[in-house]
Amino acid sequence: MKLYNTLTRNVEELKPQNPPAATVYTCGPTVYDYAHVGHWFTYVRWDTLLRTLKASGLEPKWVMNITDVGHLVSDADEGEDKLEKGARREGKTAWEVAKFYTDDFIADMHKLGMLTPDEMPRATEHIKEQIDLIKKLEEKGFTYTISDGVYYDTSKFPQYADFAKLDLEEQQAGARVEVNPEKRNATDFALWKFSPADHQRDMEWDSPWGKGFPGWHIECSAMSMKYLGETLDIHTGGIDHVPVHHTNEIAQSEAATGKRFANLWMHSNHVLINGEKIAKSLGNGIRLQDLIDKGFDPMVLRLHILESHYRSQSKFSWESLEAARNRLHNYQRMADLQFQPAQTDVWIAADQSLGAIQAAMEDDLNTPEALALTSELAGRAEERLISRAEVDAFRLALQKLDDLFGLDLADRQDITEEQKNLIALREEVRGAKDWTRSDELRDALAKQNLGLRDTPHGPIWFRI
RNA sequence: GGCGCCUUGGCGGAGUGGUUACGCAGAGGUCUGCAAAACCUUUUACACCGGUUCAAUUCCGGUAGGCGCCUCCA
């Protein structure tokens, strides 16, 4: 399996350390607000990665964290904690806010048919691990303490700028935020922040350095190492994490262990709405619930996400969502053929397509190519028939497509006996050339959202 | 200012030095009792200008426009 590695900026062969095991860590959500479609583009893509790893014979262990403390209003550790800010906004405690949005996120994950990660660790449940890691960094001389917290001295890690190919000096010239003057370097980041003297936080813990809370970056290092070991096979996240969050994760993890933190880094590009990124400041976040309210099945969004490549900047619009809905309908019509095999020698030969589809997925998750092949499969059979002889193989093929895409094609329901009887009755009157009665029956079925097409091998129904 | 990316037919979106991507939508046709589905045809596709080449949408240089990160943020 080949994947693009941000570390080397090349597509390379995935080489897990202990195959068939493969460790995957995904930077999860900060649960201070609802997730929007941009988040789902990213998370569905990682879900697709896991599905492809499994389909290729690996046994991945997937960990996705929940950031429920410490993510400050600025990634660069300025400003206040997002959770505390969200709590103030909603008149709740930070704990209540975290639980509410965590539950909402997981509910949406299920609606989108995502695999459940093996672990979804919360930062607040791993304070000890984070403190231990900071202690390790302190012992090795990578930290210093100033008035508001314990910081990582990025100048002690010479490779700091390498991952994101940062030009630290030039970058400072354009900085738009005031840097804490106590920091030794502009890129230094907080490992432990002290609670403010003037008010009590909802979330705070004792530590060797004083009461406070962990910085955002340290949680991912601490929790990934706890569950997956010191060197990850794959680390994934949004493209925005390259210059700060992941750069910092590498700095602190590799300083602590002396080992490579992750062998392969994958980043999902952003999705644009009306040519702009989705951002709080633009107020253009669309939630999964907004789609559902407009009558879209979450699977439509899932298919739409797969229609573009994860490394390219894709676009979201209601028009393209409608196109995805129609495409999904076509796939579902293909899937419904499993209930009505015909006496025909026409073969869909789905297993031939599956090899090519899987190969496309294993080529850096080329989902557009994989879907192109799937669409060809859906439209291949002459008059869209499958033969009785291949119905079992066809069902197996649908299951394999589900394994890769998660579009729920295999798990569909047959029509009712009553509906089958109506179709049979229509065949009878059609045989008698009673076109009026025949069309009445067709209209009656249409009211139950069932369409019919008459083929030389008998009528085939499809859901409208 | 620094780093990086993009510009493909009505819309979305792959890909390639010479061959139909694919999907959705529109028009015409074949087929059909009528439909439907399928199939066929169709609307001069690769921003612009140079260069390399037998051949460039696909490589190189420039121009124009747009975008992302360096604030929020997947």
Image (cartoon, rainbow, N blue to C red):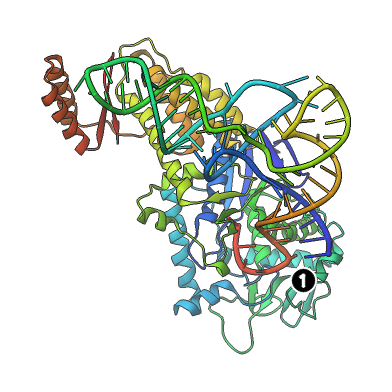
Residue A319 in percent (x, y) is at 46, 48
Q: Quadrant of the C terminus of chain A?
A: top left
Q: Quadrant of the N terminus of chain A?
A: top right
Chain to which mark 1 belongs? A
- Which residue type carries mark 1? Ala
When the figure is inspected, residue A186 is found, relative to residue A361, above or below; the finding is: below
Residue at the spot 72% in from the left edge and 62% down from the top edge:
A244
When the figure is inspected, residue A120 is found, relative to residue B35, above or below; the finding is: below
Residue at the spot 37% in from the left edge and 29% down from the top edge:
A335
Q: Is residue A244 visible?
A: yes
Q: Quadrant of residue A365?
A: top right
A334 or A414: nearer the viewer: A334
Question: Mark 1 — residue?
Answer: A175
Q: Is residue A92 visible?
A: no
Q: Secondary structure at mark 1?
A: loop
User: Is A56 situated left or right of B40 in this image?
Assistant: right
Q: Quadrant of residue A166?
A: bottom right
Q: Residues within 10 Å of mark 1 (few under 14, many from 20)?
A: few
Residue at the spot 46% in from the left edge and 39% down from the top edge:
A406
User: Is B40 situated left or right of A235 in this image?
Assistant: left
Residue B28 in percent (x, y) is at 39, 26
Residue A69 in percent (x, y) is at 58, 69
Residue B8 in percent (x, y) is at 62, 40
